[in-house]
Image: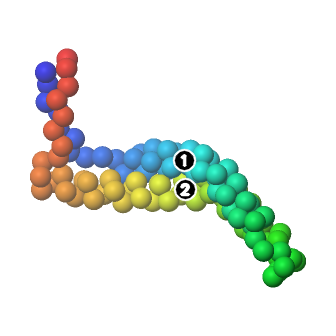
Amino acid sequence: MKKVRILQVPPIRFGLVLGLINGVIGMIVAPILLFTLGAAATAADLAIAPKLLGIPWLFAGAGALFMPLIHAVGGFVFGVLLAMVYNFAARWTGGIEIVIND
């Protein structure tokens, strides 16, 4: 058993990994968003605004189209900031200690 300390995390690399993970999550969530917003737009009361039925579908489609990109960019920015905060805190606390088998 060996103890290893994580003293520093590279911010850009951590941001890329977190951005990729969040982009995949955005690709999973996008069809769900499209379905739920589209169902809500279809179930809307047509007597009030019959001409506006296509507008919610437009917003749902645009949201579903750009959601993976928005998630990826947000994940990258959040990952870089999180790694910077960890690096700052690791200076004071000595980092995280992990026990691994040889």
Residue linked to disc 2: 71
Q: Residue type at mark 1? A: Ile
Real-space Cα distance between discs 1 and 2? Answer: 8 Å
| Above-or-below relation of 30 to 6 | below
Q: Residue type at mark 2? A: His
Image quarter for residue 78? bottom left
Q: Is mark 2 on a helix, strand or loop?
A: helix
The answer to whether 102 appears left or right of 37 in the picture is left
Crowd class of label 2 (few under 14; some 14 to 19; many from 20; radius 10 Å): many
Q: Which of marks 1 and 2 is nearer the N terminus?
A: 1
Residue located at (18% from left, 34% from top): 98
Q: Which of marks 1 and 2 is in front?
A: 1
Q: What element carries label 1?
A: helix
Check whether the beta carbons of the residues at disc 1 and disc 2 lie within 8 A of each other: yes
Residue 20, position as x, y percentages in the image = 52, 45
| Above-or-below relation of 39 to 27 | below
Residue located at (87% from left, 77% from top): 51
Image quarter for residue 99? top left
Residue linked to disc 1: 25
